[in-house]
Amino acid sequence: MFNFPVVRRNNSDGLVRIDNLFDDFFKAPIKWGLTGFETLPAVDIYEKGNSVVVKAEIPGVKSEELDIAVDDGLLTISGEKKQENEVKEKDYYRLESAYGRFERTIRLPSEVKAENAKATYKDGVLKVELPKSEESKKKKINIDVK
C-alpha cells in the first residue's frame, strides 16, 4: 500500500490518515447488486519460494461447490453458499449471514504454471498454490565493482 501523507480532519480525534480509510474499506470487499450486497471472500496473496499463494476465507461452502480457474494472469474463485435450514419464523434479532453465488477475480502478481497449481480446502480456508513460470522467477544480477 502506498503511504501518501494525505490526511483529513475527524471531529472526534483529530487527524485520520486517508490511506488507512482505504485499507479499512478494502478489507471486506463488497459487491453491490440489485438485491442489496454480498460479501466476497477475503484473500491473502503472497510469495512462498517459487510459488504464488492465494488464501481465501470461504466459510460454510462445501469444497465440491467451489470452482477455481486461471486464465491470462487472473485467478477466479467462484461458488455458492447455500442456506441449509431455512428458518420459517420471522422473529430474527439479527440476520447478517450472506447466502448465494459469489465470484472473486484476482490479478496474479507474476506469471504462473496453471497446469501445476494445487488447491486445498480446510476449515473454511481455500489455499491455492501456483508455481511461477521460469520467466517470472527473480533473477540475481551481479554488479561488478571497479
Image: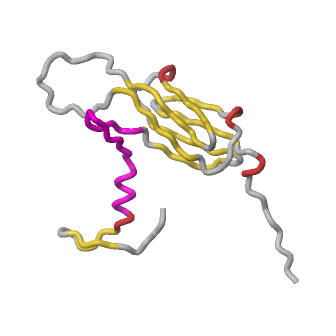
The foreground one among 104 and 81 is 104
* Figure colour scheme: secondary structure
If the image is split into quadrants, where does the C terminus sit?
A: bottom right
Is 67 on the left-hand or right-hand side of 137? left
* Identity of the residue furthest to the front in this view: 34
Q: Residue at x 70, y 45 (%)?
A: 132
The foreground one among 126 and 21 is 21
**Residue 27 position in % (x across, y down):** 39, 50
Is 16 on the left-hand or right-hand side of 129? left
Q: Residue at x 71, y 33 (%)?
A: 116
Q: Residue at x 33, y 27 (%)?
A: 99
Q: Quadrant of residue 59?
A: top left
Which span is picked out in magenta? Answer: 20-40
**Residue 121 position in % (x across, y down):** 53, 29
The stretch drawn in magenta includes residue 29 = yes
The foreground one among 137 and 35 is 35
Identify whether 13 is placed above or below 107: below
**Residue 97 position in % (x across, y down):** 29, 31
Q: Quadrant of residue 127?
A: top right
Q: Quadrant of residue 112?
A: top right
